Image (tube, rainbow, N blue to C red):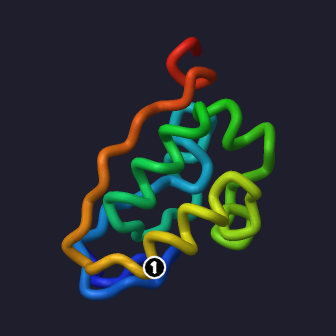
Amino acid sequence: MSNRCELCEREPVNTTIHHLTPKEMGGTFLPTANLCIPCHKQIHSLYTNRDIVTLGLTDLQSLRQDERMIPFIRWIRKQPATTIPRVRKSNHVRKS
């Protein structure tokens, strides 16, 4: 895996592959991004796969400009690369 998160730009970090358009919504062969574990967890704790598509959060720029992601990205950029915070799913995601 890459050692730089494409969303928060921290490095060196372990990254995971995030399908910008969720696989279950037809994104199997569409673009992906290498995200650090905290960023990847944060996206999926705030939004369902359907929300990601409906809200147009299918590219890095949209994710960076999302009002719910901005504070998290601002905070995580200041954290050491080894930081993996606990993430709690939003009530909206838990009920889906």
Residue type indicated by callout 1: Arg
Disc tally is: 1
Quadrant in which the C terminus appears? top right
The residue lying at 70 percent from left, 35 percent from top is: 51
Residue 67 image-quadrant placement = bottom right
The residue lying at 59 percent from left, 31 percent from top is: 48
- Horizontally, is 80 left or right of 77 in the view? left
Quadrant in which the N terminus appears? bottom left
- Horizontally, is 22 left or right of 78 in the view? right
- Horizontally, is 61 left or right of 25 in the view? right
Residue 54 lies, in percent from the top left, at 79, 37
Observer-nearest residue: 19 or 77?
77
Toward the top, the furthest residue is 95
- Horizontally, is 9 left or right of 50 in the view? left
Q: Please determine whether, in this image, residue 50 is positioned above or below residue 5.
A: above
The residue lying at 53 percent from left, 49 percent from top is: 43
Residue 22 lies, in percent from the top left, at 56, 42
The residue pinned by badge 1 equals 77
Residue 70 lies, in percent from the top left, at 66, 65
Name the secondary structure under disc 1. Answer: loop
Toward the right, the furthest residue is 55
Q: Please determine whether, in this image, residue 80 is positioned above or below residue 29.
A: below
Observer-nearest residue: 12 or 75?
75
Label 1 crowd (10 A; few <14 / some 14-19 / many >=20)? some
The residue lying at 67 percent from left, 30 percent from top is: 50
Residue 28 lies, in percent from the top left, at 50, 46
